[in-house]
Amino acid sequence: MASTTSTTTIRSLPLLHQGKVRDIYAVGEDHLLMIATDRLSAFDVIFPDPLPGKGILLTKMAEFWFQQMHDLVPNHLCHDITLEDILTDRDELRQARDRSMIVNRLTGFPIEAIVRGYLIGSGWKDYQSTGSLCGITLEENLQLAQQFHTPLYTPATKADVGDHDENISYAETESLIGVDHAREVKEISLAIYQRAAEFAGKRGLILADTKFEFGLDKQGRVTLMDEILTPDSSRYWDAASWQPGENPQSYDKQFVRDYLETLDWNKTAPGPGLPADILKKTLQRYQTALEILTA
Ligand SMILES: Nc1ncnc2c1ncn2[C@@H]1O[C@H](COP(=O)(O)OP(=O)(O)O)[C@@H](O)[C@H]1O
Ligand SMILES: [Mg+2]
């Protein structure tokens, strides 16, 4: 059983930021050490109970997908620096081992590049109340979890800690990051989704939707950052049992979200403690997704 890491303490590097899942340290001016902890978040709230080993699974999965996409888009991974180059303390090395990425520090765009192949989650909610999604008018009478004719690019704002991301129109992304960058981010996102969805499909998984983050490197190139195509940032469904109109069997956070929907909890921090059984089943789903995709 993997050891659990809820927070890290790397005293030899300046802590820049604690995200919902990652602890981020500065490595000089130009690089970051991003350690994926076992913190579990849903609805943008961090839960008191971690999922032992989740950060290791996420790291493996993101690395796998970065590799699959490296010809489509430059990514933030820095292969010239090893953990041993930056950490000498044995305990610090242990904390970072298997769950960290050393990356080029980018200037992130303030948007989340979301691609949806299926109608679910906040997309379904927006559709039910307005008939549209990110300013895109959708057909009438679509069902929950129905597949779109073509995948949709449905960007969102990148909220500050404690806030919720908000779906925005493509035009809004143009004003936020400029017309050219907006177009590039959209095109790359759709291309990555397409390739990943096809790959997952051959292994019996539906990639229902996913979120990317991009930034600019020192040369001003649009570069893929953060994590990609993990069960934290994506919805993976079992293709065999998928049925429009029904909540699909998922290999991602949906399981824990569904449980949370049964509680009388207003989706603001602090999050409730989660039953051991729910935690175990959630972790199993992450594990299964990794096994299916990388086997
Ligand atoms: N290469 C990079 N350069 C700068 N910031 C990055 C890079 N990759 C990811 N990030 C940022 O690091 C944070 C990742 O930590 P995470 O725990 O996932 O945060 P969040 O709570 O925002 O999801 C995110 O805010 C993400 O935008
Ligand atoms: Mg994140």
Image (tube, rainbow, N blue to C red):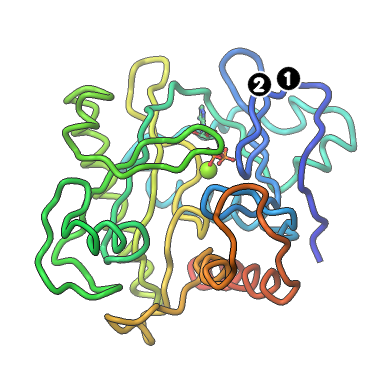
- Disc 1 crowd rating (10 Å Cα; few below 14, some 14-19, many 20+) is few
Viewer-closest of 50 and 259: 259
CA distance separating discs 1 and 2: 6 Å
Label 1 CB, ligand 1: below 8 Å?
no
Q: Nearer the viewer, residue 75 or 232?
A: 232
- Vertical position of residue 210 compared to residue 25: above or below: below
- 43 versus 284 height, above or below: above
From the viewer's perspective, tell me whether residue 285 is left or right of residue 108.
Answer: right
Q: How many marks?
A: 2
| Residue behind mark 1 | 14
Q: Residue type at mark 1?
A: Pro
Residue in the image at 37% along x and 86% along y = 240
Where is residue 126 shown, x and y percent of the image? 27, 56
- Mark 1: which secondary structure? loop
Give the mark nearest the N terminus, 1 or 2.
Answer: 1
- Secondary structure beneath disc 2? strand
At horizontal 50% and vertical 56% (from top left) the residue drawn is 230
Percent x, y of residue 210: 38, 54
Furthest-bottom residue in view? 241
Label 2, ligand 1: CB separation under 8 Å: no
Percent position (x, y) of residue 24?
65, 31
Give the side of residue 37 with respect to residue 266, left or right.
right
Quadrant where the N terminus lies?
Answer: bottom right
What type is the residue that disc 2 sits on? Answer: Ala
> Going 59% across and 28% down the picture, which residue do you hit?
80
Mark 2 highlights which residue?
26
**Residue 224 quadrant:** top left
Within-10-Å neighbours for mark 2: few <14, some 14–19, many 20+: some
Q: Are marks 1 and 2 in contact (CB under 8 Å)?
A: yes
Q: Nearer the viewer, residue 113 or 164?
A: 164
